[in-house]
Image: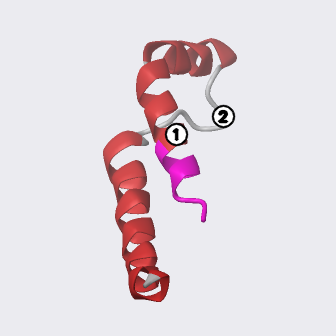
């Protein structure tokens, strides 16, 4: 019975990865940006980045 669900795990992985990358990651600051700008970005986007991190962790088999 479990072997019937195994192929769906690949589909679920791809769907969750696309949701994380396209839907939640957004445009992050580059490495050359000032530290204050990077800190401000993560301060403002903490919930969004937290959800993205949780969904990314959920894709791990």
Residue 32 image label: 2
Instruction: Please indicate, yes or no, whether residue 61 appears anywhere in the rendered image.
Output: yes
**Front residue of 30 and 17:** 17
Q: Secondary structure at mark 2?
A: loop
Indicate the quadrant where residue 42 lies.
Answer: top right
Q: Is residue 49 depicted above or below 7 in this figure?
A: above
The image position of residue 50, as x and y in percent, is: 51, 29
**Front residue of 36 and 7:** 7
Disc 2 crowd rating (10 Å Cα; few below 14, some 14-19, many 20+) is few
The image position of residue 25, as x and y in percent, is: 43, 42
**Front residue of 32 and 2:** 2
57 part of magenta stretch: yes
Residue hosting label 1 = 54
Instruction: Answer left or right for 2 relative to 15.
Output: right
**Front residue of 1 and 47:** 1
* Residue in the picture at 47% in, 46% down: 55
* Residue in the picture at 52% in, 58% down: 59
Which residue is the extreme one toward the front?
1
Residue 13 image label: none
Q: Is residue 61 depicted above or below 57 in this figure?
A: below
7 part of magenta stretch: no
Instruction: Please indicate, yes or no, whether residue 26 appears anywhere in the rendered image.
Output: no
Frontmost of labels 1 and 2 is 1
Q: Is residue 17 depicted above or below 40 in this figure?
A: below
Indicate the quadrant where residue 12 lies.
Answer: bottom left
Which mark sits nearer the N-terminus, 1 or 2?
Answer: 2
How many numbered markers are drawn? 2
Q: Quadrant of the N terminus?
A: bottom left
Magenta residues (range): 55-61
The image position of residue 27, as x and y in percent, is: 42, 39
């Amino acid at each position: 019975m479990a072997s019937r669900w195994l192929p769906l795990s690949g589909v679920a992985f791809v769907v969750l990865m696309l949701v994380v990358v396209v839907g939640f990651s957004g445009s992050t600051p580059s490495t050359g940006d000032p530290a204050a700008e990077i800190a401000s970005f993560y301060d403002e986007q903490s919930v969004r980045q937290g959800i993205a991190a949780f969904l990314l962790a959920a894709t791990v088999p």
